[in-house]
């Protein structure tokens, strides 16, 4: 059996999990998530844990087994604790300002960039240069953070741009001079 898939997922207090056919619904203090699981996977919520079963030992079923279990665990953790990603803005004059329903980014373009927050996502800005993306859906939080980073990715010469907190940007050396070209 899959080492990940065979472990039951514990359900913390305050979280309710219901399975109706292929649809798994998880409700908790931070929100509610629904997901359709693969038709060949058997999901059962009994008591204070969720178990996932698979029909055979095929490689495809083993992969789906671990994936399904991990997706359900992420849903449970999302509605109970939530997920967040933190981004940093580096560059002179670069900043983020919170707006109703999104952000206004000033990152070196001739115009500010407006970013809308999708449903279930909340932006918080600390000191104009640190953006925190919060939500209950792990995939959506990661996708929104990646789209924010894509507005102005960090460039390797001066390091300006939007990056994840703790991300190391490999710096390149600039031009050395024109004395070698004249010879």
Image (cartoon, rainbow, N blue to C red):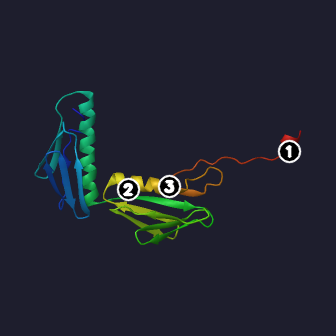
- Residue drawn at x 46%, y 71% as measured from the top left: 98
The percent position of residue 135, horizontal first and vertical second, equals 34, 60
Horizontal side, residue 162 vs residue 138: left or right? right
Mark drawn on residue 149:
3
Q: Residue furthest left?
A: 47
Q: Position of residue 110 (x, y in %)?
A: 62, 64
- Of label 2 and label 3, which has the lower sequence position? 2
The reply to whether the C-beta atoms of the residues labelled 2 and 3 are less than 8 Å apart is no
- Residue 111, horizontal then vertical, whole percent: 58, 65
- Rendered image: mark on residue 42: none
- Which quarter of the rendered picture does the C terminus lie within? top right
Circle 2 — which element?
Answer: helix
Between 22 and 61, the residue placed more toward the observer is: 22
Q: Is residue 164 visible?
A: no
Kindly identify which numbered label has been placed on residue 141: 2
- The image quadrant where one finds the N terminus is top left
- Residue sitting farthest toward the top: 58
Which residue is depicted at the point 41% across and 72% down? 100
What's the CA distance linking mark 2 and mark 1?
50 Å
Residue 149 vertical placement versus 37 (above, below): below
**SS class, disc 1:** helix
Name the side, left or right, on which 171 lies relative to 142.
right
Q: Which mark is residue 179?
A: 1
C-alpha separation, residue under disc 2 versus residue under disc 3: 12 Å
- The label nearer to you, 3 versus 1, is 3
| Relative vertical location of residue 178 with respect to residue 88 in this rendering, above or below | above
Q: Residue at x 26, y 37 (%)?
A: 64
């Amino acid at each position: 059996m899959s080492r990940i898939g065979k472990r039951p997922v514990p359900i913390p207090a305050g979280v309710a999990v219901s399975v109706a056919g292929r649809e798994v619904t998880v409700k908790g203090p931070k929100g509610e998530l629904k997901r359709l699981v693969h038709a060949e996977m058997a999901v059962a919520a009994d008591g204070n844990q969720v178990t996932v079963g698979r029909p055979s030992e095929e490689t495809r079923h083993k992969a789906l087994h671990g994936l399904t279990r991990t997706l359900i665990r992420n849903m449970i953790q999302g509605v109970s604790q939530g997920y967040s990603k933190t981004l940093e803005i580096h560059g002179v004059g670069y900043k983020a300002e919170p707006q109703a329903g999104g952000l206004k980014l000033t990152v070196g373009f001739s115009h500010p960039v407006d970013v809308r927050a999708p449903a279930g996502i909340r932006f918080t800005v600390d000191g104009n240069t640190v953006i925190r993306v919060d939500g209950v859906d792990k995939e959506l939080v990661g996708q929104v953070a990646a789209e924010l980073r894509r507005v102005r990715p960090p460039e390797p010469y001066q390091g300006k741009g939007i990056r994840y907190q703790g991300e190391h940007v490999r710096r390149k050396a600039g031009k050395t001079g024109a004395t070698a070209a004249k010879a």
